[in-house]
Image (tube, rainbow, N blue to C red):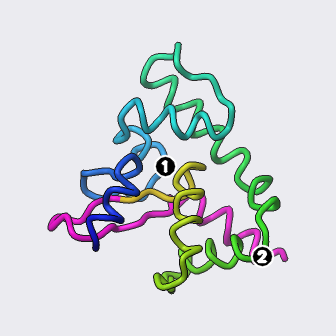
Amino acid sequence: MSDFLLKIFEKETINKLPLDRLYPILESLDDEQLLHIADTYSLDIENLNGQEKITALEKEIKGRFSEVLNTFDEKEHKSFYDFYNGSVDYSDENVYVNMKKFTALGYMYLFLSKSGTYFNFVIPVELVEIYENLLANS
């Protein structure tokens, strides 16, 4: 991966082993990363303690997931589906724009590989379950 991409996603990058559940992922984020996601939802968590911040964010992300997905345009839906399905076309410049959006929403997390050369992206299990139910019912 280019240094350019590492720089673009510097704020979103988690330099720890990948996790698959939302709460533990949120626990692994620093305060700046938590506040960045909270700002996306206009959620004021600054005066909360660490565990309260995580609980509030987890509730907001899971609680608004379906609602926010319904605001996505066709390209955003396709991009999210591609990430979910693991068939991402990285030559599409919209992938990186949407990656920024999905990380800001707390729908996807970018863990830096051990070698530091690429990202392992994770959509938390809880969100995958909600998404699969939405797909099954559409």
Question: At x 81% / y 59%, what residue is drawn?
Answer: 71
Numbered badge on residue 83: none
Q: Quadrant of the C terminus?
A: bottom right
Vertically, is 52 above or below 79?
Answer: above
* Residue bearing the label numbered 2: 74
Hey, what amino acid is under mark 1? Leu
Mark 1–mark 2 CB contact (< 8 Å): no
Q: Which residue is mark 1?
A: 22
Residue 111 coordinates in the image, percent (x, y): 33, 59
Element under label 1? helix
- Answer with the quarter of the image where residue 84 lies: bottom right
Amino acid on which the number 2 mark rests in the picture: Glu
Which is nearer the eye, 104 or 135?
Answer: 104
Question: Which region is colored magenta?
Answer: 111-138
In which quadrant of the rendered view does residue 56 lie? Answer: top right
1 vs 2, front mark? 2
Q: Is residue 120 magenta?
A: yes
- Furthest-right residue in this view: 138
Using the image, determine if residue 75 lies above or below residue 115.
below
Quadrant including the N terminus:
bottom left
Residue 97 image offset from top left, x and y in percent: 57, 65
Q: Residue furthest front?
A: 4
